[in-house]
Image (cartoon, rainbow, N blue to C red):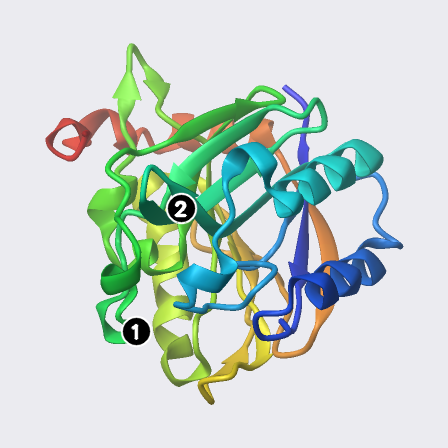
Amino acid sequence: MQDLRITFVQADQIWEDKTANLKHYEELLKPVTATDLILLPEMFQTGFSMNTNLLAEKMENSPSISWLKQQAKEKQAAFYTSLIIEEDGHCYNRGVFVEPSGDITCYDKRKLFGMAEEPVHFTAGTKEVIVEYLGWRINLQICYDLRFPENSRNGEIDGKPLYDLLLYVANWPERRIQHWSALIPARAIENQCYVAGLNRVGVDNTGLSYNGQSKLINLSGEELSNLSDAEGVITYGISYLELKQSREKLPFLKDSNYRLFRN
């Protein structure tokens, strides 16, 4: 099993301006080479807007999805982020895992943020999604999902963990950043997995300030990388062998009651 190189793109987002955001990401991504997985913030090309009438796209003709496919092919790396997708009369905060081949795995955010009236404008997803990529099993999550441990309960089937890496892409405000910094290591420890959390920076059109703190955590809760509070791009490799050996040394997952939380 190969190591997995993860690139964090901690960016400021231009409010509801898709063209400007995509151009900005292109500039940030220019120096990125030799990576396997690239993370962009939640609602990557709009910011965390409830303006679904203006901003929603359909999967089959989405210019933003086309851009992600193009970037994935050029970088020979998968992308994970979210955007506003309309389907059958419903809008979803949809996570998309876009592979260099053009294959897409979708995850619809299950925990919608009531304080921002997200449930008024969006329909919640109902299913956990774990994608297999380069031999790694990756659990897809979005922002507010982080607060709910039942959303990511790991365990074993026939001695094999359900997943190895947990991803969160977010617009997590500075006023509650201490929660973000506490919960990401907690998810890593309780699920014996790596956790990658990618947040944004800057100020959005509602006046909320975001200070990043994107981070990669190992299953012991140790911080492997942290982008602090400024725009930046960093790539860090994680080791499957290290993960496997640590799980064998402390085989907690076999005692998990994960079946209580499966869909």
Amino acid type of the residue that numbered disc 1 sits on in the rendered structure: Ala
Q: CA distance from mark 2 to mark 1?
A: 18 Å
Residue at image location 37% in from the left, 48% down from the top: 92
Q: Is residue 187 above or below residue 162?
A: below
Residue 141 is tagged as 2
Residue 208 is tagged as none
Tell me which corner region of the image, top left, top right, bottom left or bottom right, holds residue 255.
Answer: top left
- Alpha-carbon neighbours of circle 1 within 10 Å: few (<14), some, or many (≥20)? few
| Label 2 element class | strand
Q: Is residue 182 left or right of residue 76?
A: left
Q: Is residue 159 above or below residue 60?
A: above
**Viewer-closest of 55 and 250:** 55
Residue at image location 40% in from the left, 25% down from the top: 248
**Viewer-closest of 4 and 189:** 4
Residue 116 is tagged as 1
**Viewer-closest of 162 and 126:** 126
Q: Is residue 82 above or below residue 126?
A: below
> Residue 213 location, x and y as percent?
55, 71
